[in-house]
Image: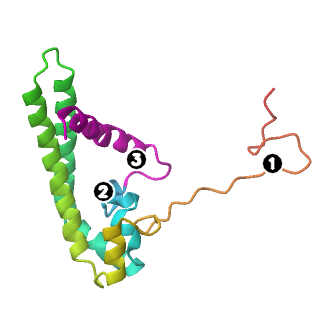
């Protein structure tokens, strides 16, 4: 892979994905409130797990929570360092490559922790689940943890009134 492609992909993953996750409605990210599976929560292999397997996966990952928090903090710092260096007046490709690889090491460690948690899932994955994961055909994306993130029902204005759903007069 050419260096500019590597940098652009790293920036997309490092900057835009966390921004997209932060823009999601609902409570704060799971890492702040309970078990976390990081980026894999968006679908991935976790989508094929049964409820019992998901609980087992979350418990295994929760055992590594301290290490995950350390790695996430290091990753944020490494990404910030890369961005600061990339806008510096003096461009040095080798220095930028080293900083990008430093950030990638944190991501690799987090991926290994997630894989370790997946290897500890009980009951073990069925051959069908393994084939779906290998084929890249994960199951439906479901909310993680014990909290169900639901969108509140839309309120309807009172019938026969000239008011909006909040009981206010309509805008002019």
Between the residue at mark 1 and the residue at mark 2, the CA separation in whole angstroms equals 40 Å
Nearer the observer: mark 1 or 2; the answer is 2
Helix, strand or loop under label 1: loop
User: Splitting the image into 4 quarters, where does residue 112 fall?
Assistant: bottom left
Between the residue at mark 1 and the residue at mark 3, the CA separation in whole angstroms equals 32 Å
Question: Which residue was labeled with disc 2?
Answer: 38
Disc 3 or 2, which lies upstream in sequence?
A: 3
Helix, strand or loop under label 3: helix
Helix, strand or loop under label 2: helix
Q: Are marks 1 and 3 in contact (CB under 8 Å)?
A: no
Furthest residue in direction right, as rendered: 160
Are there few (<14), some (14-19), or many (20+) residues within 10 Å of tag 2? some
Above or below residue 143? Residue 51 is below
Between the residue at mark 3 and the residue at mark 2, the CA separation in whole angstroms equals 10 Å
Are there few (<14), some (14-19), or many (20+) residues within 10 Å of tag 1? some
Q: Position of residue 55 (x, y in %)?
A: 35, 75
Residue interval drawn in magenta: 1-29
Q: Which mark is residue 157?
A: 1
Question: Which residue was labeled with disc 3?
Answer: 21
């Amino acid at each position: 892979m050419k260096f500019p492609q590597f940098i652009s992909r790293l920036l997309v993953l490092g900057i835009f994905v966390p921004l997209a996750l932060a823009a999601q409605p609902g409570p704060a990210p799971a890492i702040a409130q309970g078990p976390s599976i990081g980026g894999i929560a968006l679908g991935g292999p976790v989508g094929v797990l049964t409820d019992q397997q998901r609980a087992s996966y979350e418990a295994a990952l929760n055992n590594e929570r301290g290490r995950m928090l350390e790695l996430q903090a290091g990753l944020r710092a490494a990404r910030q360092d890369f961005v600061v260096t990339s806008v510096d007046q003096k461009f040095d490709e080798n220095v930028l490559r080293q900083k990008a690889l430093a950030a990638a090491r944190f991501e690799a460690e987090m991926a290994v922790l997630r894989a370790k948690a997946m290897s500890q899932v009980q009951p073990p994955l069925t051959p069908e689940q393994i084939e779906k994961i290998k084929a890249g055909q994960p199951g439906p994306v479901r909310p993680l943890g014990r909290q169900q993130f639901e969108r509140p029902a839309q309120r309807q204005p009172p019938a026969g009134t000239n008011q909006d759903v909040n009981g206010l007069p309509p805008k002019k």
